[in-house]
Amino acid sequence: MSLKSDQLQAIAKEVYQKFPELKGVRPDVQNQPVPSAKTPGEGERYLLTFKGVSALAGTGRLVRVVRVTADGRGRVLKMSTSR
């Protein structure tokens, strides 16, 4: 089983609200099974990686990477970012 389109869109919406510079970036999705699962869906976790570039004042730029861990139901369990 993988994330459904509506689940993926809901997760992306959360990321876009916190990090507007990533709006429109499509994530890389990796499946991370959990061996100690008791119910279907609980045993699946997904790592979504959003990568984007922001312009800084002057000529600089900032590469931002946001990693989101979500469960099989599309709920965000953890969100972390570079910088």
Image (spheres, rainbow, N blue to C red):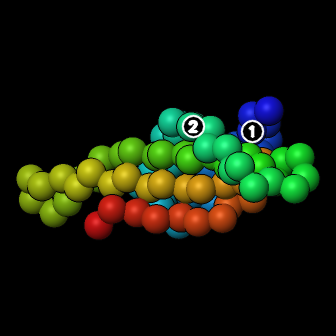
- State whether residue 56 is above or below residue 50: below
Residue drawn at x 59%, y 56% as measured from the top left: 69
Amino acid type at image mark 1: Leu
Residue drawn at x 9%, y 59% as measured from the top left: 58
Q: Quadrant of the C terminus?
A: bottom left
Local crowd at mark 2 within 10 Å, few (<14), some, or many (≥20)? some
Residue drawn at x 67%, y 54% as measured from the top left: 70
Q: How many marks?
A: 2
Viewer-nearest residue: 41 or 61: 41
- Residue marked by disc 1: 3
Q: CA distance from mark 1 to mark 2?
A: 9 Å
Q: Secondary structure at mark 2?
A: strand
Amino acid type at image mark 2: Val
In which quadrant of the rendered view does residue 17 lie?
bottom right
- Residue marked by disc 2: 29
* Residue 9: percent from left, percent from top: 70, 44
Numbered tag placed on residue 81 in the rendering: none
